[in-house]
Amino acid sequence: MPNKNIKYNSKKLLEFFSFNRQKWDEFYPSERWVFDKIGGKDKKLGDVLDVGCACGGLGAALDERFILASYTGVDVHRGAIDWARRHQKLSIPSYFITGDILEVDLNNRYDIVVSLSCADWNIEAEKIINTCWENVDKDGYFVISLRLTALEGINNIKESYQYINPSGKEKDPEIANYVVFNFKEIVSIIKGFSPSPELIGAYGYWGKPATTAVTPFDKLVFAVFYIKKPALVSNTKISTEFNLPEEMNGK
């Protein structure tokens, strides 16, 4: 059965991501914090899979600061992938694939699988999250950005959506799903991964929804999760490290 995800093709996305989020300091503090934590003192990230890579800017930013073995970017936007193939010149082997992560056959396991502004911009968010986890190698990490609330979450593009105009200057007919997860719900989903994670961490802070978003929320916690897959599948203990506002983590 075909999945329900949106096949983005707006030129606004290509225009934005070919000039933005190409350098380390153009990424959010939460994103930089998590990668610095995972990279540690030796700054080694290994083989990286970037799900929803747009023009591959994350690959360029990580290559600027860390030691990578390889970088693979996957995105549904053909124009963005074509741009990345032509213009992204990384110092490590790099590969760019057009397609939905739910439909792409990746015969590999990656040290880090990343999903920034991807799963919560599409319809089958939970399926994307689970598929990303499947591609994480043993002892590897899954890094994902999500919008959080302590209230009831929402995944309904008719009630919560965003216009595809990242610059905020004008609207585009194409819209994105604007998924918001209840914090306890998403932690429950993550704990239910197979195999179970060894560690679930998150770093985030309060912010207002994008000016181009139409959503019932007037404030959200924008968080980046880092989830570690155990080296041994038999491991059942799950540690947590939540650096989030009190309303989210119950402190």
Image: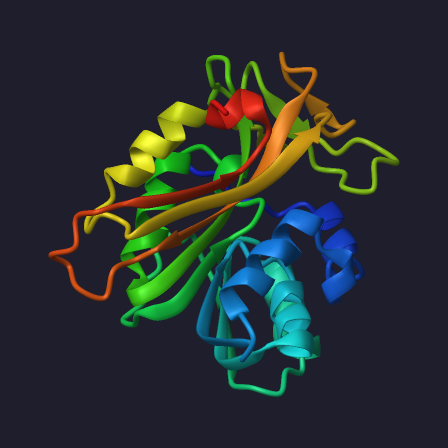
Foreground of the two, 219 or 80: 219
* Residue farthest along the right direction in this orientation: 169
Residue 167 horizontal/vertical position (percent): 83, 42
Residue 3 horizontal/vertical position (percent): 34, 39
The quadrant of the image that shows the N terminus is top left
Left or right: 235 as drawn, with respect to 155: left
Residue drawn at x 35%, y 65% as measured from the top left: 140
Foreground of the two, 204 or 8: 204
Residue 109 in view, yes or no:
yes
Residue 241 horizontal/vertical position (percent): 45, 44
Position above or below: 68 against 178: below
User: Which image quadrant for residue 127?
Assistant: top left
* Residue farthest along the left direction in this orientation: 234
Colour treatment of the image: rainbow
Position above or below: 30 against 45: above
Foreground of the two, 49 or 46: 46
Residue drawn at x 45%, y 32% as measured from the top left: 123
Residue 4 in view, yes or no:
no
Residue drawn at x 28%, y 50% as measured from the top left: 197
User: Which image quadrant for residue 106?
Assistant: bottom left
Residue drawn at x 15%, y 59% as measured from the top left: 233
Counting labels gives 0
Position above or below: 232 against 245: below
Residue 43 horizontal/vertical position (percent): 56, 76
Position above or below: 57 against 122: below
